[in-house]
Amino acid sequence: MKLIEEMAKELGLTITRTSNGSEEMSDKERSEALYQLMEEMANSGGIESIQDPVKWQKEIRKDRPLYGRE
């Protein structure tokens, strides 16, 4: 959950914690909350720091030298 919160902050999203009457969420509730977060991210118009998604993806996928295999 901490990773999701950090990613949401990087994307400029706000996470509001709600209580459903118990400390632990069920798997179904957790899945629904995660789905809702992903929907919000998709509807926000994407990540503003990535100007050209195709170029960004190509840069991310570049082969990098592997340690010990240079």
Image: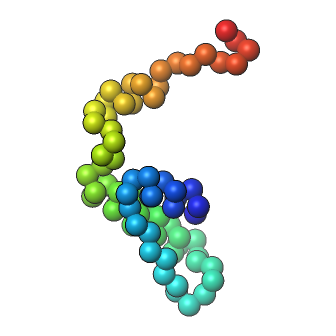
Residue 26 position (above or below residue 19): above
Q: Indicate the quadrant where residue 57 lies.
A: top left
Residue ID at (58%, 76%): 26
Which residue is rendered at x = 37% and y = 57% of the image? 12
Who is closer to the viewer here, 57 or 29?
57
Horizontal side, residue 25 vs residue 33: left or right? right
Residue 24, quarter of picture: bottom right
- Single out the residue that lies furthest toward the right: 68
Count the labels in the image.
Answer: 0
66 versus 30 height, above or below: above
**Quadrant of the image containing the C terminus:** top right
Q: Residue at x 60, y 87 (%)?
A: 22
Residue 32 seen in render:
no
As drawn, which residue projects farthest toward the top? 70
Q: Quadrant of residue 8?
A: bottom left
Near-viewer residue (51 or 53): 51
Residue 64 in sight here: yes
- Residue 1: percent from left, percent from top: 58, 63
Residue shown at the point (61%, 16%) measured from the top left? 65
Q: Residue 35: give x, y in percent of width and height.
A: 42, 63
Residue at far bottom of view? 21
Q: Position of residue 63 (x, y in %)?
A: 52, 18
As displayed, is residue 21 above or below residue 45? below
Is the residue 64 above or below the residue 31 in the image? above
Q: How is the image coloured?
A: rainbow
Report x, y in % for residue 39: 34, 61
